[in-house]
Structure formats: C-alpha cells, structure tokens
Amino acid sequence: QVQLVESGGGLVQPGGSLRLSCAASGSSLSFYTVGWYRQAPGKQRELVAGITGGGAANYADSVKGRFTISRDNDKNTQYLQMNSLKPEDTAVYYCNAKPVWAAQINYWGQGTQVTVSS
C-alpha cells in the first residue's frame, strides 16, 4: 500500500506559478498510474492531470497549456507545475495513485491548498 504526501501549495497572485510535489512511500510509484485532482468549495473533485508509467499524460481542458505533470520514479515523487495561474484554479489539490493492476483502487494524499488571489 502506498502513502502519499503533498507539498508546495500556497497563496500566489494571478499569473504566477507554483510547483506541487507528491512524495510516495510504502511502495514504488512505478507500479501506479498517478495524477492530480482538485476540489474547490461547493464543487466536486475533478481530475486535473494524469500520467502513466510510460509517461503518457492527459489534462483537463481548463489547464492545458498551463499545467505540466511529471513523475520521477527514482525519487518516488510526482509533480504538478502550474503556470499562468488564475483565480478559478483555487482549490485543494490532491495527488492520486492507482495500481496498474487494479485501476479501481485509489490512494490519496491529504491535500494541499492552492489559492490564487491578488
């Protein structure tokens, strides 16, 4: 079973950048498809970006061209680089891992708050 811990959230002005990190322990991330979700107040949790073990990435339309997901299996860590941030990106961001042999299983981090405001 994998444990996930996010870091890197905070307050940033519109147009700014943040990089979120998600460190895994207990298992190698190479066995998992990983991704980032977010949940704004009063809204459902939504997929922001995902990346397979082979490096194939997908993004929500709202973040394409601004966010980049990556993974470093040697460091057992995944990242979300967020550029050109907008107020509507404000949410709690969660990292996620799904075993490649059981995609219905989800492991979650505790979440990190991202606030975009002037």
Image (cartoon, rainbow, N blue to C red):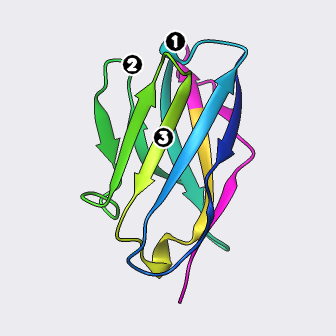
Q: Please tell me which of labels 3 and 2 falls first in the chain.
A: 2
Q: Which residue is mark 2?
A: 53
Q: Choose top left, top right, bottom left or bottom right for residue 15.
A: bottom left
The stretch of residues the image draws in magenta is 97-118
In the image, taking residue 68 as reference, residue 41 lies left or right, namely right
User: Amino acid type of disc 3?
Assistant: Tyr
Q: Residue at x 30, y 61 (%)?
A: 66
Q: How many marks?
A: 3
Q: CA distance from mark 1 to mark 2?
A: 7 Å
Of the residues shown, which amino acid type is indicated by label 2?
Gly
Residue 85 x %, y %: 41, 71
Q: Quadrant of the N terminus?
A: top right
Position of residue 72 measured from the top left corner of the image (x, y, whole percent): 45, 25
Mark 1 residue type: Phe
In the displayed structure, 87 sits above or below 94; it is below
Q: Secondary structure at mark 2?
A: loop
Is residue 105 shown above or below 49?
above
Give the mark toward the camera: 3 or 2: 3
* Residue occupied by mark 3: 79
Q: Secondary structure at mark 3?
A: strand
Mark 3 or mark 1: name the one nearer the start of the chain.
Answer: 1
